[in-house]
Amino acid sequence: MQNWVEVVLRTLVSVIVLFVLTRLLGKRQISQLSFFEYITGITIGSLTAYISLDLNSDWYLGIISVVVWTLASLGIEFLQLKSKKARDLIDSTSRILIKDGKILEDNLKKERLTNEDLLELIRKRDAFKVAEVEFAIMEPNGEVNVLLKKEFQPITPSHLGIKVSPETEPQATILDGKIMDEALASAGYNRKWLNTELEKIGVSLDNVFLGQVDTYGELHVDLYDDKIIVPEPQKRAVLMADLKKCQADLELFSLSVDNSEIKQMFGLCSDQLEQVIADVKPLLTT
């Protein structure tokens, strides 16, 4: 067998074996590498290259070595699931670098970080002043997570005592000018509705690169022709305007009639609608 043919066959076998074993190791190997997993990744890569190119050695020995490394990694992961001591020994533990706006110099030295390193890490978490940080913790995988003090955290609806309804995943109903019927059905609509929405904004289906339907049933499109300006959906704004107009009309009727019972009825309806508007305003103005 010619050398180039053998290299091709070895490489194909290596790719298949590496793919199977990587899937066996799971996604954690990709997203959160511990020290041992880092070593395992480098070693498996080196062994795979050895299998592909070292024609003077038996290829199956490299396969055996890769399999042993994979089984060892799986065994250590299983041990970590069962024992906290093993997790602490293999992955190490989290360490607090900043507490209540104060840098803990001893912990910084233990992680071999300089002041500049720390500042760079917290800037990546949108924290530019140490004094604004409640906690900064270095995780076992080397990432630094930051919790700002309450007075420096962004305001959310919960801070204002406003309840908002959960949003569902936007459905991609149009991809590359083609209607995705399954996604459209998941959103609770059909092709007739979609074509009507496209007509409202004056866009043809074949010019739509991406179309999404959000929680509120509004269609958002991105066009191939970027020069065309697509108007933003106005359903919620129109509904809010209609509600306010109805409330104003009820209040006007209450002031214009002389009958006390009718005046009271219109006034009560106006107050109730005003409360409804206040309740739905977070949904219709976001």
Image: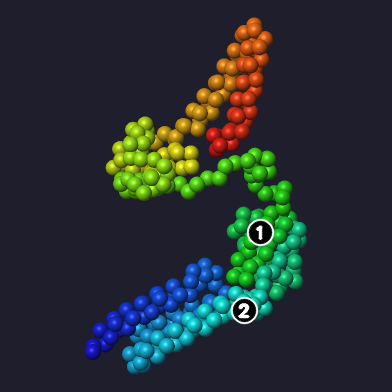
- How crowded is the residue under tag 2: few (<14 C-alpha within 10 Å), some, or many (20+)? some
Q: Position of residue 60 (x, y in %)?
A: 37, 89
Q: Which mark is residue 34?
A: none
Q: Which image quarter: residue 94?
A: bottom right
Q: Position of residue 226 (x, y in %)?
A: 36, 42
| Left or right for 270, reference 238 | right
Looking at the image, which residue is at 35% across and 92% down? 58
Spot the residue most to the left.
1
Dividing the image into 4 quarters, which one contains the N terminus? bottom left
In this figure, which residue is indicated by the disc labeled 2? 90
Q: In the figure, 64 relative to 275: above or below?
A: below
* Label 1 secondary element: strand
Give the residue type that dot 1 points to: Val
- Residue 273 visible somewhere in the drawing: yes
Query: What is the CA distance from the residue labelled 1 to the residue labelled 2?
Result: 24 Å
Dividing the image into 4 quarters, which one contains the C terminus? top right
For marks 1 and 2 on the same chain, the one whose residue lies earlier in the sequence: 2
Q: Which mark is residue 146?
A: 1
